[in-house]
Amino acid sequence: LQSTTDSPVAVETLDDVPEHVLRGLPEDVRLFPSAVDKTRLGVWATKSILKGKKFGPFVGDKKKRSQV
């Protein structure tokens, strides 16, 4: 028989985000709870971003798709 009690789930907060990531966000981009996983933060645009719009520079370590 399995236990019906859920174990506590850690919820990611802005305190978990390195300062350089927050400084590197474009003006119209914010971090809010993810629409996919409420325990994680997601990247949200506060207004429409035109197709092809580029922003940067990228700050941090690049990861392979298999690492994220």
Image (cartoon, helix red, strand yellow):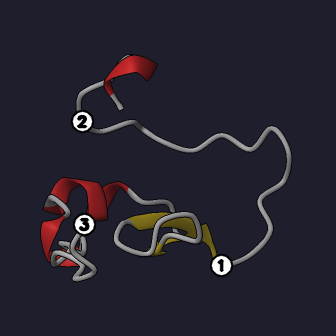
Determine which residue is flagged by label 3. Answer: 1
Which residue is outermost to the bottom?
5
* Residue drawn at the location 14% of the way across and 67% of the way down: 16
Q: N-terminal of the two: label 2 or label 3?
A: 3
Q: Looking at the image, do the residues carrying marks 2 and 3 touch, with CB atoms under 8 Å apart?
A: no
Q: N-terminal of the two: label 1 or label 3?
A: 3
Question: From mark 2 to mark 3, how far is it between C-alphas?
Answer: 46 Å
- Disc 1 packing (10 Å; few <14; some 14–19; many ≥20): few
Q: Is mark 2 on a helix, strand or loop?
A: loop
In front of the other: 66 or 55 = 66
Determine which residue is flagged by label 2. Answer: 60
* Residue drawn at the location 80% of the way across and 38% of the way down: 52
Question: From mark 2 to mark 1, how far is it between C-alphas?
Answer: 23 Å
Q: N-terminal of the two: label 2 or label 1?
A: 1
Can you say whether 48 is above or below 53 in the image?
below
Which residue is outermost to the front?
1
Can you say whether 51 is above or below 25 in the image?
above
Q: Where is residue 47 in the image (x, y as percent from the top left)?
A: 74, 76
Q: In which quarter of the image is the C terminus?
A: top left
Q: Is residue 42 left or right of residue 10?
A: right
Which circle marks residue 46 in the picture? 1
Callout 2 amino acid: Gly
Callout 1 amino acid: Thr
Quadrant in the rendering for residue 36: bottom right
